[in-house]
Structure formats: C-alpha cells, structure tokens
Image (tube, rainbow, N blue to C red):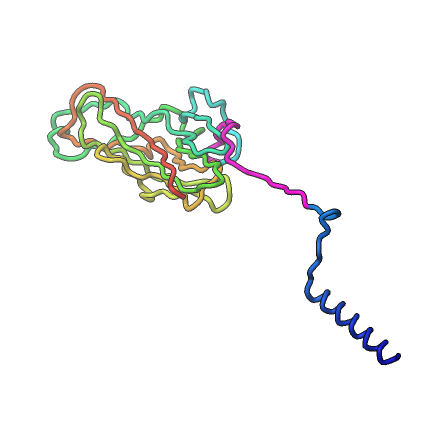
C-alpha cells in the first residue's frame, strides 16, 4: 500500500540520480550519427610576392624594383617560403692613386665605399623573407671571394652601423657580430639570424655608403682593376 508506494518512488528517484551523475547517453544507431570534418594548412609556395621596403618592412617599396638608381637587387619568391629578398647590387670602392710609400708601409689601407647611388634617398640593405608556418630558424652568412686578378689576398670588408627592422613586433633578426660585421675571404661568416623568429620581411639596413669599407694589406696592392663578390647564403635551420 502506502509503504510499497514510497518504496517505488524511492527506487525511481535513485534511478534518476544514478542516470544524471553517470552522464551516459546511449546513442540510437537509427537516429544518431556524426559527420566528420577536417581542415589542413601548408606553406603557400604558389603565391609569388615582391619584397617590401627594407627600411619599413611590410610597406611597399618606394621605387620600382627595376629602377637603376635603387641600390638593392630585388628578388621575388613564394609567400610561404624562405628566401633572400634584397641584397646590395654592388660595393663600389672607387679608384685610388697609390705610391710605393703606401705599399711598403706594412699596414692595412682602408677605403670607404663611394656612393654610386643616392645614399640620401636610399639605404643599402639585406632583407630576408620568411613566410613558413612550420619552421622558424634561419641564418644568413657572407663571404668575400678571391679577386679575379689573383691579388689583394687577405682583404676584408666591414659593414658598420647596421640596424635591424622587422615587419611584425618583437621579431627583429639578430646581427651576429653586433655593431660591425667583418666579411673575410678565408671563410663564411654569419651575418644575420632569426631571433628566434623573424617572420614576414626582416632587414639589416645601413644608411651611408661609407658604412661599408674595404681593408687591403698594403703589401698586396698591385696596379689595375680588381673585382670580387660578396657571396650571401641563406640557410634554413632545423626548427
């Protein structure tokens, strides 16, 4: 009677509590189904982009890249790739009158780069583009080649007063050697590095042509024109 009624109510209440606390909902195979969804991302190697202004990365270059007065070689590459976007076209150290007293001085003679471009309007720069989404490390190295004359062995080139700038906040690359970079003939030297990320366009920029200098052992100087190259190499890291 009333006792049995109360027992049935307690039993029903216990079942409801057990069901609520267990959180188990049985699926009916005839009425319950799931639809799978997925999305995939990869580096964009199809879209080709033009480097941006190395003095203000992310902004359009202030000149047409083919303008002969612009001091940088402008290289296009994939938006989602890693590539060397801008390097100086040339380092022009001019023509100099040298006497025997200079040659036998036993020292190192230093010559500034001469402004073969308008260094009041433009700056020389090295710019790296990194649009990868899976890796971040990179290092840019440089080496001075031997001169085509076979002379001037032991010469070096230095770059002073370079500053780093980046497209995105807190992603300036690292100048490995600091305020002055020395580029030698003997081996490749690290110039610029991600720190630890340097995404989009990042640059090392110097304002004056005279920030670049060549240092030549006096006793190696011979008459004539001597041509060499600074060879830049961008290497992707493991991470």
Does 211 sit above or below residue 63? below
* 101 displayed left or right of 114: left
Q: Which residue is drawn at the image coordinates 31% and 41% (left, top)?
A: 180
Q: Position of residue 172 (x, y in %)?
A: 44, 43
In this rendered view, identify the residue nearer to me: 21 or 154: 21
Does 147 sit above or below residue 136? above
* 190 displayed left or right of 61: left
- Residue 29 on the magenta span: no
- Quadrant the C terminus occupies: top left
* Number of marks in picture: 0
* 35 displayed left or right of 178: right
Q: Quadrant of residue 162?
A: top left
Q: Position of residue 204 (x, y in %)?
A: 40, 37
- Residue 52 on the magenta span: yes
Magenta residues, as a range?
34-56
Q: Position of residue 49 (x, y in %)?
A: 51, 28
Q: Which residue is drawn at the image coordinates 56% and 38% (left, top)?
A: 40
Q: Which residue is drawn at the image coordinates 39% and 31% (left, top)?
A: 124
Main structural element of the magenta stretch: helix, strand or loop? loop
Q: Position of residue 137 (x, y in %)?
A: 40, 42
């Amino acid at each position: 009677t009333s006792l049995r009624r109360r027992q049935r109510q307690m039993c029903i209440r216990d079942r409801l509590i057990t069901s609520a606390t267990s959180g188990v909902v049985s699926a009916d195979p005839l009425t319950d189904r799931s639809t799978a969804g997925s999305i995939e991302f990869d580096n964009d190697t199809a879209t080709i982009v033009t480097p941006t202004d190395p003095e203000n990365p992310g902004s359009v270059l202030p000149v047409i890249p083919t303008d002969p007065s612009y001091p940088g070689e402008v290289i296009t590459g994939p938006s989602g790739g890693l590539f060397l976007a801008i390097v100086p076209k040339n380092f022009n150290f001019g023509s100099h009158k040298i006497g025997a007293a200079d040659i036998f001085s036993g020292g190192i003679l230093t010559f500034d780069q001469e402004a073969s471009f308008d260094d009041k309007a433009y700056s020389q720069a090295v710019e790296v583009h990194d649009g990868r989404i899976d890796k971040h490390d990179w290092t840019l190295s440089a080496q001075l080649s031997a001169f085509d004359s076979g002379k001037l062995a032991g010469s070096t080139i230095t770059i002073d007063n370079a500053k780093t700038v980046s497209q995105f906040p807190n992603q300036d690359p690292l100048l490995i050697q600091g305020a002055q970079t020395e580029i030698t003939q003997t081996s490749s030297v690290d110039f610029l590095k991600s720190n630890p990320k340097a995404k989009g366009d990042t640059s090392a920029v110097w304002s004056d042509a005279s920030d670049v200098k060549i240092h030549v052992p006096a006793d190696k100087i011979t008459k004539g024109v001597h041509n060499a190259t600074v060879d830049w190499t961008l290497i992707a890291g493991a991470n």
